[in-house]
Amino acid sequence: MPQQEKQVYSYEVKREGGEDVLYIDYLGAPYIPSIAESPDVMARTIDALMENPNVSRVIFVQQKNYNYDLEETSMLLEIAQLYTYFVRQEKVLSREKIGGIEQFFSQRYNEVFSFLLLLKQDPLAAYTEMKKVTINSKLFLERLGPGYRADQAGYKNFLERILSLLENTLLLQRAIPYLSDYQRGDREIYSRIFRPDVIPNFTYTRLVSDLPEDAEIVDQYEISNESYDVSLVTILRKKEEPKLIYHIIPSENSLTEDHSGLLNTARKVLIEHQPKAEEFTDTERTRQVFFNISKDLLQDLAQSKGIRISYPDLNKLAMILVRHTIGFGLIEVLLQDKKLQDISLNAPISMTPIFVRHQDYDECITNIIPSQEDIDSWAAKFRLISGRPLDEANPILDTQLEIGKIRARIAIIQRPLSPDGLSYAIRRHREEPWTLPLFIQNKMINSFTAGLFSFLIDGSRTLLVAGTRSSGKTSLLGSLMLEINPKYRIIVIEDSLELPVESMRNLKYDILRMKVRSALLKTTTEVSADDGIRTSLRLGDSSLIIGEVRSVEAQALYEAMRIGALANVVAGTIHGASPYAVFDRVVNDLDVPTTSFKATDIIAVANPIKTSDGLHSWKRLVRLSEVRKHWQKDPLEEKGFVDLLQYNVEKDTLEPTEDLVNGDSEIIKEIASSVKGWAGNWDAVYDNILLRARIKQEITNTAEKMKNFRILEAKFNTNANHAFHRISDSIREEIGLPLGERVFPAWQKWLNQEIKKTKIT
């Protein structure tokens, strides 16, 4: 064999992620290697597996890598082991096995030899041919005289044993249902069984590109970051599988061989020029620099290789190159999907597919399996971005990722906390802030609830948004921040940057963010949350927003609540499934005095509502309660919690309680007591809540009617709130009270004019 041919078909076994992977080099081959299509490729693979019986995956290396998974590799391994057993242990070509009569030996030898030759190239053909030979041997036995029958019977039994061993292999068991119309040389059946994941050479991530044959398509849509970078998402359902399949084909998996080759070469060049640690502090600038460098490099390489490349393709290739060098690979592609809420990478990541939580389809399993190289690289980049350690002494890293408009919270754990290695939890934030009209649209709240929230925020109440994990607490808190009048200053304190501060800055809010140390971290140079809260009190008159109340900062928060209870909004999120659960956590777990807890005015509880089969859930606000001040020790026993809104599960909506309808709300009365015309006038107060609710509903209805949902977003919501306050003040000056019957028509006129003016159609 020429030296070049040896090099082309050479192979090596690498230990990756706890498994042995067989790499066979096809870079110089004039064809795309395929076990399904090529007898030579199948035989060559089986030969390599005979020498390496511990392999769990096979990869053909070319401009794109072709990955055969454990199941497919196991089928080939079994054939390889069976071949070895026949030749070395059973010695099936020996006279002892074939038979002792000389006149039959040559024919029998050729039959068994042909079978062995076929076994590595085409096991199905070997099986069908052996079946014919076995039948013929039986027929021949019936025609023989007594002197030859014993020898022929022995040969027939020998063939039947061979046939039985082959018939019981995994490959034959999969193939037998399709053999009725099989003809020798037809490899269509192999195409149903051996379907490799196609992995571009510039990435290590495995991706199952083919749709499962036994799955039903539920939905299909495209996602994109730019017009030239489009990925296809298919949602599939398999029988008896509890989770749907989230199947994605990113743009990098639909490249031509020429473009894949360009990226392979460009990646090798760029990998030698990785950015320095300090450059990761400004990730967006670094990505832009690398994007421009990538475009220049790809242009030069294309010219040198005589490859024509269009400008959109050049941009696409440069984008792909950036995310697979200094970026986060296919994680970035998943984050482009606005319908994804959470992305989970569970250890051992290299052996486990990525899971996602979809806004329409709940928990789904993806067709993506990252490599060990990927996850180690991502961890190193997140360490640089965060400036925080991630090692055995500090096995937890909490940080955030921003790529253009995409924002996500990243939580990483490693050994010893995660004994199987690195694990990631990624929470994707909405690109624009949630608003109360948006929450009305998706039924997390109704318009009356939105009106009541608006009233409470304008009344400068202290408020906690409680709930379980993934209940929408932070998103709801962000929407309430947008209800604060922009003329007031807002201070936001977070350990992970999740609240929509940047968006609110763009809307001209007077807002200051403070980043504090996570309660999960042992050591860091960052200021603690409680010190951050105490510092905020020295920064002047402001509304105070706490991202999440987790630890000892609760004591400082309640100091702030007591100081600001009748002056400014103080709000935050906390884990708890009920008002009493919040009390228990704050007082008993976080050591806040009982008397201080009374500084809480309102507790809003958000929890997922599940269907009876447990397969689907929806985020809902299920309770809004006020905290009375008369109780001494236990607010539950002493009726310190009074529900203003309760969730009706049958109607799937929040309803006002009799206490609220009858005006028995101490908090709302306190707000009214300081407003001219409202003190002692419950009808006027309730009318104002209904007015605010009507306005929020009108925004939602208009968006639905026009099929343009931009008016549900933060910018329009802020303008609508400003118009409401301006019109209310004008009518108050005119008649003494901002009556709904006067305010709403005037506001509705503004709405219609604004829509025309801004051409929102």
Image: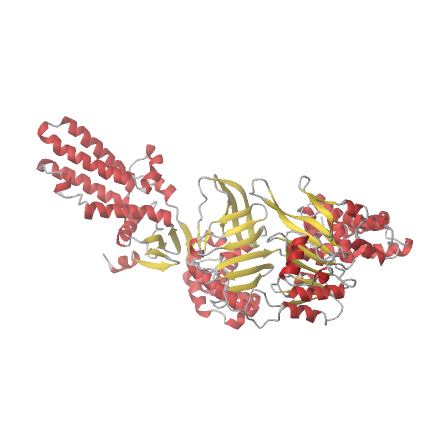
Judged left or right of residue 629, residue 390 is left
Q: Quadrant of the N terminus?
A: bottom left
- Say which residue appears at 12% left-offset and 28% top-offset: 144
Judged left or right of residue 672, residue 760 is left
- Seen in the picture, residue 631 relative to 703 is either above or below; the reply is below
Q: Give the percent coordinates (x, y) of residue 158.
A: 19, 37
Q: Nearer the viewer, residue 42 or 17?
A: 17
Does any portion of residue 228 appear in the rendered image?
no
How many numbered callouts?
A: 0
- Seen in the picture, residue 219 relative to 586 is either above or below; the reply is above
Judged left or right of residue 248, residue 40 is left
Colour scheme shown: secondary structure
Q: Give the percent coordinates (x, y) of residue 648.
A: 69, 42
- Quadrant of the rendered image containing residue 677: bottom right
Q: Give the percent coordinates (x, y) of residue 563.
A: 75, 66
Q: Nearer the viewer, residue 335 or 754?
A: 335
Q: Nearer the viewer, residue 405 or 363?
A: 363
- Seen in the picture, residue 570 relative to 106 is either above or below; the reply is below
Does any portion of residue 611 appear in the rendered image?
yes
Q: Give the percent coordinates (x, y) of residue 759.
A: 73, 51
- Say which residue appears at 72% left-offset and 66% top-offset: 560
Q: Nearer the viewer, residue 437 or 258?
A: 437
